[in-house]
Amino acid sequence: MCELFGFSSGRAIRANDLLNLFFLHSREHPHGWGLAVFRGHAVTLEKEPVRAISSTYLEHRLSCHIEADSLLAHIRRATVGEMTYANCHPFVWDDDSGRTWTLIHNGTVFEPHLISPFFSKQEGTTDSEGVLLYLIDRINRRRNAEKRNLSDAERFQEISEGITALAACGKLNLILYDGEQMYVHSNYRGYLHFSEEGDSVCFSTLPLAIRHWEPLPLNQVFGYISGELVHEGAPHPYEYLDSRHDMSLIYGAYASL
């Protein structure tokens, strides 16, 4: 399965050591890598449909100083979508207010009725990109209904409710960043871990050696701003269990993508 890494911090921190450890895991993840580096509201997006440890570009990139106050990284082992640039994470889209949203995801939405309306709009053929577009659509609808931009608490409420609805449809491990707030969720036991140190918090599928890690609580959305936990969503009952679905359902659900 794909692996996720990200952090939110109250100050810019050097990320090279953590990224080097994370991308070493790509031996088992041959279908692509991606990196989104944030400085304030600006995002630099880099990704390739190749194994991370085989990428000459990534080798040179990691030899340079990488510093950010927020960051997302992904290594891909695909279940849905071909091995192409458009299907590599992170995915980046803007909402109607011009706010940029960036997503990394692991899992599969087995019952895609919530995200299928966005298949014709997305650039790639993954359910992950559909997840991002669905969540942004929820933000747009509420913003347009209230005729104003949403506060961080209102955005969190809308995203938390959207993630809960999607978690009822499958396996949903994700980190989402809106340029201000980072949203984190897992409904698969043992999949995602977190590490708090000073004014920063890191998230990783597998613990990375240079920090102390704890399992992320299941079935709940958490919102962080500048490394601080500011919002917690209501717990939901939709833990994903491996035996719940036959893998053939994946390919049937996305055959029309």
Image (spheres, rainbow, N blue to C red):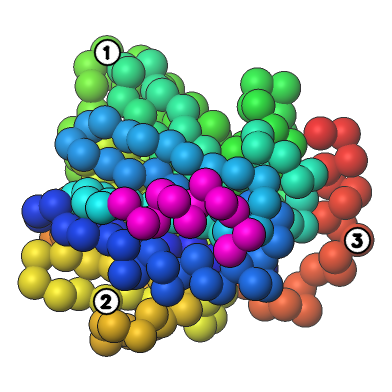
**Crowd tier of the residue under label 2, counting other residues whose Cα lies within 10 Å: few below 14, some 14–19, many 20 or above:** some
What residue appears at the point 67 percent right and 72 percent down from the top-left corner?
28
What residue appears at the point 82 percent right and 55 percent down from the top-left corner?
250
- Residue identifier under label 1: 147
- Amino acid type indicated by mark 2: Ser
Q: Name the one closer to the observer, 145 or 96.
A: 96
**Crowd tier of the residue under label 3, counting other residues whose Cα lies within 10 Å: few below 14, some 14–19, many 20 or above:** few
Q: Do the residues labelled 2 and 3 touch (CB within 8 Å)?
A: no
Residue 248 is labelled as 3
The stretch in magenta equals 53-64
Give whichever of discs 2 and 3 has the lower sequence position.
Answer: 2
Quadrant of the image containing the C terminus: top right
Residue 195 is labelled as 2
- Amino acid type indicated by mark 1: Lys
* Image quadrant in which you'd find residue 246: bottom right
- Compared with 95, 179 (above or below) is below
Give whichever of discs 3 and 1 has the lower sequence position.
Answer: 1
**Residue 253, x across and y down, in percent:** 84, 46
What residue appears at the point 9 percent right and 53 percent down from the top-left corner?
11
